[in-house]
Image (cartoon, coloured by chain):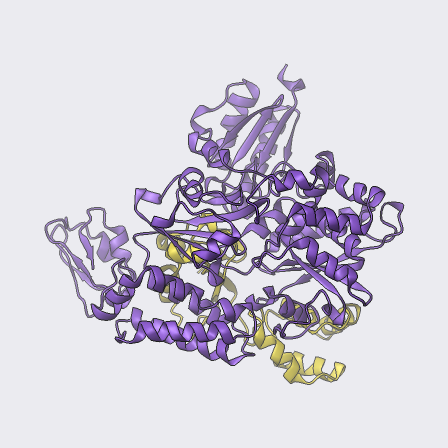
Chain colours: A yellow, B purple
Amino acid sequence: MQDIREKILEAYHENEGNVISLLQDIEESFGYLPQDAIDWFSEQLDIPPSRFYGIATFYAQFHLKPRGENIITACCGTACHVKGSERLINSLMRELHIPSGEDTSEDKKFTVEKVNCVGACSIAPVVIINKEVHGKMTADRLMKEIRKIK
Amino acid sequence: MMQECNIVIKVCMGTGGIAAGGTGVVSAFNEEIKAAGINASVEKNCSVHNVGCRGFCARDVLVDVIIDGEKTTYEYIKSDMVPRIVQEHILQGQAVGDWEVKEDYHTFHEKQVKVVLSDCGEVDPEDIESYVERGGYEALKKVLATMTPEETIDLIKASGLRGRGGAGFPTGLKWEFARKAPGEPKYLICNADEGDPGAFMDRSVIEGNPHSVIEGMIIGAYAIGALKGYVYIRAEYPLAVERLKIALDQARQRGFLGNRIQERDFNFDIKIKLGAGAFVCGEETALIASIEGNRGMPKAKPPFPAQKGLWGKPTVINNVETLANIAYIIRNGADWFAQFGTEKSKGTKVFALTGKVKNSGLIEVPLGIALREIVYDIGGGIEGDRKLKAVQTGGPSGGCITADMIDIAVDYESLAKAGSIVGSGGMVVMDETDCMVNIAKYFLEFTQAESCGKCVPCRIGTKRLLEILERITDGRGRPGDMDLLEKLSNDIRSASLCGLGQTAPNPVLSTLRYFRDEYEAHIHEKRCPAGVCKNLLTYSILEEFCKGCTMCARVCPAGAIVGEKKKPHKIIQEICVKCGACFETCKFKAIKKG
């Protein structure tokens, strides 16, 4: 844990002291931004935590809570929208029993995220399951894919 | 004999190709060819576009088999189809006719004019040699050897190239401002934060031919006198980032980046900055704030970035497609470029043609082309031969072109007159099953969520706009709502600080202008004519068509469908969640939506 933090700190200094890059490194290493990590960097760099949180909550990429083991990203771009992405998301939430307003299942196995557009509009609607892009998705096929990893 | 032939197999390996199983196809070809003991090279060619796939990602995996220069293109290829292609085509010289692309593949390309995409797909994006072989980096060498920075700027000015990111500002002029602005060092930034939903031009260009963007950046840096460049790219594009990294390393090794480029007194290097997921960072001043490591909030202009940009120094920000044009303009001349397009809109433009169109994909056309040609000739018409309703251009900042305006010329001026914009190049085709009020709401949800919160008209105005649209689509619309939408929209437009807020009401104004009847149906009759808005819909079963196959009951997630096998079923309205699963599943058209 300490090692990872030291490494990130080193990269920060090489990186012209860029806070966004720092947070990206933390997110990459831990899967989210743990509060104790923020506090630690805040102390080391003498930057108030509020600045970290200000940036973290501004950008969609950062998460303040741990995410599920499996990340399912549903594209909500215009092409996916007109081809029924909303229905896919609704069926996902039902299948995984994720209450509305939340994005992660209770057992922390699944996180469902929406993304503005992954730029694969020709094969809309698109769902990314653990970094693998699936195009021309139907609710039926999606459920099959999900049950495979459930 | 065949063993001595020059056989090249090009497999589409862009995001679209990979999603369709491109990786498996490449390894299948490698295995089969090895097993057959023939000498062919499987190039991981064509990111998503051109030749291997030529922008036609909907047909992936597309495979080119080129034997002695004769090319055969196959569509929808899966790895288990590879052995037959190798056996029949490569070994026996007989192409597999059933799997070849059909007529529409060719009509898709006929009306296109490729400048930016001309090498996309021809070159292997992970190999600088294949770009150099096709004349890559010649433009850079020419500029460094024979042209002054001023001459370079003049040439770009003469070509009439305008920024392809959306605003359409003349590129040469932007460069000139930065060149003349006092302050050192200067910076050049490539804006690859392609945030418009429904747009993937920049991703495709970087995935397909990253060196064309890098070459454009180096030339731009030379012209304005920049020592350092950044590519600000979305983290949502992992493949593009990867290929860009590889390309930058290769360009450094070949002496196109770094100190004393091509043995001349010119230093320039490029760094990648990953965006962290904020749409507003596509706006120049917000992008700069983000590179500096801050919240990406826009600033008032002037001063423009060309005067005071990154770290307060003169900075040019160009879009990916703009930069990808540069090398081709230098190589072929300003006049060559200016022959395409209209008087005020020169050159070609890449569009992402998507939505309810038969042939969706990435296209490049001369500016000024009729929208009809794009939708019906290149796009092949509307899916399922339904009726065209509108073409949405310019994403969340744009508007709609209606079916009866289909002959409009696609250029900066004409689209602006119709209340839309060229924008970055998203073009989403909508048919009679799309609800325009819902589309307006969709875009407002987007801009509202992406509003940075700095200025009140945008932060609160878009929220109120969205609330009104939500109540209209929920069936709670009030009589004065349309006037209210219009008034609020105009206020947001004129009082917002940056482009995001100023253009956020465009989808509302544009749909209000052309689709008033749909708003009226929602507000006064509590009806959604296109059958999209959930709360205004009911699903029911037509007894005379229902065969009692139980399919609908099985897919219903709410358990709202009851009935005995082989007897007509029934939907219990109180339980129905209106997801539409039954409607889609029923083979007998027994589910009524309305």
Q: Position of residue B567 (x, y in %)?
A: 11, 52
Q: Position of residue B258 (x, y in %)?
A: 83, 53
Residue B26 in the image: above or below residue B418 = above
Which residue sits at x=69%, y=56%?
Answer: B173
Q: Position of residue B73 (x, y in %)?
A: 52, 30
Count every numbered label the image shows and give the total: 0
Of the pair B274 and B134, the residue shown nearer to us: B134
Q: Residue furthest front?
A: B343
Of the pair B572 and B169, the residue shown nearer to us: B169
Q: Position of residue B65 (x, y in %)?
A: 57, 28
Q: Is residue B273 visible?
A: yes
Q: Residue furthest top?
A: B1
Q: Quadrant of the C terminus of chain B?
A: bottom left
Q: Is residue A106 visible?
A: no
Residue B476 in the image: above or below residue A47 = above
Of the pair A6 and B526, the residue shown nearer to us: B526
Is B464 on the left-hand or right-hand side of B310? Answer: left
Is B205 on the left-hand or right-hand side of B292? Answer: left
Residue B303 in the image: above or below residue B432 = below
Which residue sits at x=70%, y=74%?
Answer: A19
Quadrant of res B417 = bottom left
Is A11 on the left-hand or right-hand side of A120? Answer: right
Quadrant of res B268 = bottom right
Quadrant of res B490 = bottom left
Of the pair B581 and B80, the residue shown nearer to us: B581
Q: Quadrant of the N terminus of chain B?
A: top right
Is A73 on the left-hand or right-hand side of B183? Answer: left
